[in-house]
Image: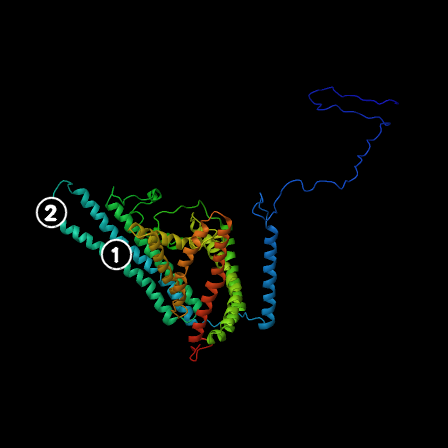
Amino acid sequence: MATDVSTIIATDTAQVKAPVTVPSQTEQKPKSKVRSKYRHVAALHATTRPSCLSHESPETPSFLGFRNLMVLTIIVMNLRLVIENAKKYGLLITLTSNIHAVDVRWGALLYVLTPIHLFAAYLIERVAMEHAKGAVGRRKKSDAGMKKSPETENELKDFLNTWWYIAVAHTVNATLALGITSAVVWFCIRNPGIGMVSELHAIIVWLKTCSYAFTNRDLRHAMLHPGGPESAIPLIYGNCPYPKNITLSNLCYFWWAPTLVYQPYYPRTEKIRWGFFFKRLGETAALCTFIWLTCAQYAEPLLRNSLEGMAVFDLPSIAERLMKLSTISLIVWLAGFFAVFQSFLNALAEIMRFGDREFYGPWWNSTSLKMYWSTWNKPVYHFMRRHVYSPLVGRGWSSGAASIWVFVFSGFLHELAVGIPSHSLLGVAFLGMMAQLPLIFATEPLSRMGDVGGKVIGNCIFWINFVFVGQPLAAMIYFFSWQAKYGLLSENRPNP
């Protein structure tokens, strides 16, 4: 066919979307587009534009590349430290250790006996509950308009005296929970690791015992004074109202729940995810092993090498060792934080079907010290706010005075947790907590500034205090004190 043939297939217009052209064999191919010659007069600077890192830039560029660079730099620097440590010391990790059997036995005994104080608090609350139920029963039987008889006045006096006895019993029980363990650790356990685990366990039980007593006291007061100004209780407590919560099963759940604040009822998950549980348990075991290896291979020799400079108070040597220790201390602390608050507490919450798992917040973005202390350890923060800060403010204390008392109380617990196991009540941990107060007052205005600069400065102050000043310096001081008593600097070391 010599001429072009074009046919439009239209047998079914509903099926045909566009005409189809069938070209002939003689149809010419379209000519390629011819590019014009590049002209050297193109206007590349046609508008005003700021540099991408300037504040005037409409869009903030991504810093993903710099983040990758910093991660790689940290990896390379730590690999260099690993190689340097291996060349200098060799392999220091061994399966044997200097843990004495006596320390292990005392630690195991304390672990078993310390929770008894929780059950003692339960028995005290049972007595208080029976007295409260009796008072409610007598009130229902009495005539509201009848004048009280002398016998009723005597019963009221005995009733008030009973509350004092219950308060004293709770105080003595909670004090013994912390005092007995502290005495045993101080006099009978030489190993700082076992001593610290035992002391921390006692502090946790002590805080739980206090919360159990305080909460049930308010619930009992609300039951005895219905309609009063302090009778309102959270709606969630309606699932287990007082005194139905005073049961052994309720106490045992609180004993193992990953919280320091007692509630008659907690939000629960529907089921246990066993896969999630074993993953978190594996993470805990792996991170604990990593911490042990890091401390044995890197932290301990570095601390031992710092003893000579500490003994003669050589400030340049101490500063150099402090900066070296800061890297190891940071790695160990971050691993410990993840092991406890992300892995272990989530595993415990899963097995207990505990619903509220906000154990921490994004503390690494803290723009002030106040933000850090309120986000990195939510269980302790919740206890301090509920049982220390809020009651003080409710009694007329100012917010600043209540905050100071919270840090005094926290500093006391920190000193017990570190000073008792190391047999060195130096007050360093306590003073370290007190030193946070001026830093909080200094960084709080920075976090409230509208521009980014103030928040960046506040975050940098937080990291400097966290990495270089706080933990490494305290570790060096307590290690030196322990070695002076029982270790390399001691003339009278304990016999194995």
Give the class, few, some or many, for how many residues have Cα within 10 Å of label 1's Cα (few <14, many ≥20).
some
Q: Is residue 165 left or right of residue 3?
A: left
Q: Residue furthest bottom?
A: 491
Q: Is residue 259 left or right of residue 95?
A: left
Q: Reply above or below: 34 against 221.
A: above
Give the class, few, some or many, for how many residues have Cα within 10 Å of label 2's Cα (few <14, many ≥20).
few
Please say whether residue 240 is visible from this viewpoint. Answer: yes
Q: Earlier in the sequence, mark 1 or mark 2?
A: 2
Residue 322's spot in the image, x, y percent? Answer: 50, 67
Q: Secondary structure at mark 1?
A: helix
Q: Is residue 65 left or right of residue 123?
A: right
Quadrant of the image containing the C terminus: bottom left
Residue type, numbered disc 1: Ala
Residue 19's spot in the image, x, y percent? Answer: 74, 23
Residue at 59 percent across and 72 percent down: it is: 88
Quadrant of the image containing the N terminus: top right
Residue 313's spot in the image, x, y percent? Answer: 47, 74
Of 361 and 41, which appears nearest the observer?
41
Q: Secondary structure at mark 2?
A: loop
Q: Residue furthest right?
A: 2
Q: Dots 1 and 2: beta carbons under 8 Å?
A: no
Q: CA distance from mark 1 to mark 2?
A: 28 Å
- Residue ID for mark 2: 149
Of 213 and 438, which appears nearest the observer?
438
Q: In the rendered picture of this protein, how many numbered marks are placed on residues?
A: 2
Residue at 81 percent across and 22 percent down: it is: 6
Residue type, numbered disc 2: Ser
Residue at 25 percent across and 52 percent down: it is: 128
- Residue ID for mark 1: 167
Residue 166's spot in the image, x, y percent? Answer: 24, 56
For residue 195, the mark is none
